[in-house]
Image (cartoon, rainbow, N blue to C red):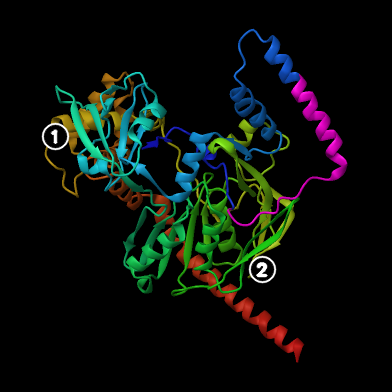
Amino acid sequence: MRFCRRWLPAAILSLSLTSFGSLVRAAGPPASDNDIRQSLKEFSKVYDLVESNAATKVDADRAIFKGAIPSMLRTLDPHSNFFDPQAYELLREDQAGHYSGVGMMVGAPEGHVVVMYPFEGSPAFKAGVHPGDSIIAVNDKNTTKLDVAGVSSLLKGPRDTKVQMEVRRAGDDKPLVFDMTRGQVPRSSVPQAFWLKPGIAYLKIESFNENTSHEVDAALKKLNESQITGLILDLRDNPGGILQEAVAVADRFLQKGQVIVSHHGRASAETKFFAQRGERGPQYPVVALVNRGSASAAEILAGALQDHDRAWILGENTFGKGLVQAPYPLSGDSALLLTIAHYYTPSGRLIQRDYAHESFYEYYTRQSGKNNLQDARHTDSGRVVYGGDGITPDEKYATPELSDLEGTLAGNLTFFFYAPHFFEQHREKLPQDWKPDAATLADFAKFVSARGLQFSQDEWKKDEPWIAERLREELFVTAFSKEESDKVALRQDPEVWQGVRALPQSRALLERAKAVMAQRELHTAQLSQ
């Protein structure tokens, strides 16, 4: 079972680039010990006063672990964090790339918990669970008053154990009961790898967990990498993850010995990561797609590819997270995720955005893109790149703004809520080439009006092609799978096709960098004679 994160801003998910390598746990300067002891003494005094005199009984765990410690960490930086046992378990599951449960995304868009979609191949998918199913009971326990976390905890459990889920579905008079066996549910960090057209491949890296580099290798092997003449590498909305996995992915595209990233901090010595094996396939051009939701480990990969002129970077400025966190397990299955270092791209850029002069809300929500002109560096071919707020793309791509009607339909999840209504009337299986016809679009317009959304006929006519495509994508989630729906959407994504058109620029970068590096090597050889 997973919490549905559809409504969380992408930047909020970009909380940590976690390094699980060796750590240097150095003590602070001895001169500060007296100050620290005095501060702790004062804290203890304040706590005793509160515990003795507060109007309500003090919950020690809540006061310390949900109050004092998180507040202390917020004085450091936006990414140091305290994880209670539940949050730490979710973090470890995300890093592991799998968990034990029934395999579906749930949410509560209208106050009650519903299935957003089951993962393809999961126990819930095989049992026939549909998006929009309203969960009313788990193992005979009524769940109508529970939140997402409460329902999720009931559905999760050890592998090979039984769980029964009762749902209400549009068009069915009686509740449906699903008897499922929990299993290990893999959450691929590389959910999409397919051919856009002959020779041009698409690869999506959604995050960096413990399996990402192996998944990338497997995906390229399945595509038969020797047939690739150009690759679209999609890092959009990738919040990051494990540093070593980003390094491993960069390794397969760079030349052996090239620097991928370095990091150092007050209590950790400088560490440099190099390409250990180098390119393991043809040197085809790469276009990497990025946006403001690309953060941390995704920025390490994009920065390495850009600094070595190995990829043309297309999209928006990335988030700008140049900090490394290390996990420190605590008692009671909780943990501290502490920022221990800054990381730098191969050219030496620091891409961390400023957080010292603004609130954390502003840090996560304001637009990025402010270059640090004092931190000018050069790529292998001599192009100027800057530190500052994230990775600046080689080519900007602004996602077209939605019209008022489009924004309202998307923001209110109208397509999601229409899907159960549609399948209530259409029980037959949709063909793979299905597209909404005039009758379906008219029915959808009636559904939209019934939900109280106002629009003019001119607005509808103007936005109808966009509406038809979004409708098709949403209905494909139920008819086939979320993964198949995403593939349909990606094949129609204008930014993906702009990436295809930019492949010649990537090839030119690659050739220029090779020529410059060869000239430098020749010059070095001549000097050594």
Mark 1 burial class by Cα count in 10 Å: few <14, some 14-19, many 20+: few
Q: Which residues are magenta?
A: 20-45
The stretch drawn in magenta includes residue 34: yes
**Residue 37 locus on image (x, y percent):** 81, 33
Q: Amino acid at mark 2?
A: Gly
Q: Quadrant of the N terminus?
A: top left
Answer above or below: position of 429 versus 496.
Answer: above
> In the shown orientation, is residue 263 left or right of residue 275?
right
Q: Nearer the viewer, mark 1 or mark 2?
A: 1
Q: CA distance from mark 1 to mark 2?
A: 59 Å
**Residue 468 locus on image (x, y percent):** 27, 39
**Residue 478 locus on image (x, y percent):** 24, 39
Q: Quadrant of residue 60?
A: top right
Label placed on residue 255: none
Element at label 2? loop
**Dot 1 and dot 2 residues touching (CB under 8 Å):** no
Q: Residue at x 64, y 47 (%)?
A: 389
Question: What residue does disc 1 label?
Answer: 426
363 or 411, which lies in front?
Answer: 363
Mark 2 burial class by Cα count in 10 Å: few <14, some 14-19, many 20+: some
Q: Amino acid at mark 1?
A: His
Q: Is residue 189 visible?
A: yes
Label placed on residue 382: 2
Q: Residue furthest top?
A: 55
Answer above or below: position of 380 versus 60.
Answer: below
> In the shown orientation, is residue 342 left or right of residue 159?
right
Q: Mainly helix, strand or loop, the magenta region?
A: helix
156 or 449, which lies in front?
Answer: 156
**Residue 465 locus on image (x, y percent):** 29, 40
Element at label 1? loop
Q: Residue at x 65, y 51 (%)?
A: 351
416 or 451, which lies in front?
Answer: 416
